[in-house]
Amino acid sequence: SGMTPDPSSTACEKCVQNDRVECLSQELRRLKRLVAQLQDDLRSGLSEVRGRLEESVHGAAAQTAGLAERIVIAEERRKTQDDAAEAMAAQITTLGLELATWPSAPTLHAALDRLEQLAATALVLDGEPRHWDEHQLGAWLVRLGLPESIARTFEANLVNGQVAVDL
């Protein structure tokens, strides 16, 4: 009960505690170095990630600008094509309106036939009126100022120069 501790055992305990403190100190220094290295690695990694993000942002901005430029060009082309289509539509409408005012093909053919007859008749009107055919007589009546409908009626009824003399 009143035992005094053995001085050698107390010294040993102190050695063990000192060794343990030294060991823990060394472990703490090692961990601090490891944490410092990890912090450096983290800073370096963050810096690299930040650089890559900035590159990506710049690349995306350049792509966006390029796409915006392409969109503007495409819209300008579409507008040009729309304007050209509208101009062409207007020309087609104008042409359609002009064509609507033209006489029909049968009317044009009849007019051409009549012109040919009048041209042929004009060459022959110098001859004896009794020998004129109905077209020559019709052309002469129109030249005299009679309405063309009367000349056509004469032609339709085959009134030639000989018949006209008898009228």
Image: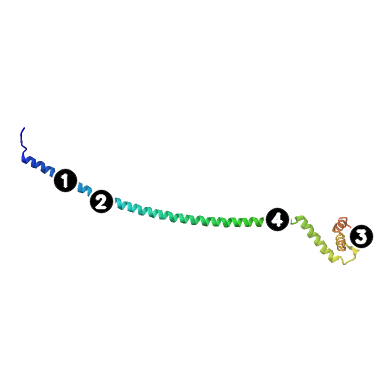
Choose the circle earlier in sequence order: 3 or 2: 2
Asked which secondary structure carries label 1, the reply is helix
Residue depicted at x 81% and y 60%: 114
Point out residue 158 in the picture as x, y percentages from the top left corner. 88, 57
Residue 55 located left or right of residue 127 = left
Asked which secondary structure carries label 4, the reply is helix
Mark 3 surroundings: few (<14), some (14-19) or many (≥20) residues within 10 A: some
Q: Which of label 4 and label 1 is nearer to you?
A: 1
**Alpha-carbon span between mark 3 and mark 4:** 45 Å
> Front-most of 32 and 49?
32
Choose the circle earlier in sequence order: 1 or 3: 1
Mark 1 surroundings: few (<14), some (14-19) or many (≥20) residues within 10 A: few
Residue depicted at x 65% and y 56%: 90
> Mark 2 sits on what residue?
37
Q: What is the quadrant of the C terminus in the image? A: bottom right
Query: Cβ–Cβ below 8 Å for labels 2 and 4?
Result: no
**Alpha-carbon span between mark 2 and mark 4:** 88 Å
> Mark 4 sits on what residue?
97
Residue depicted at x 53% and y 55%: 74
**Alpha-carbon span between mark 4 and mark 1:** 107 Å
Amino acid type shown at disc 3: Ala
Q: Which of label 1 and label 3 is nearer to you?
A: 1
Residue depicted at x 16% and y 45%: 23
Q: Which of label 3 and label 2 is nearer to you?
A: 2
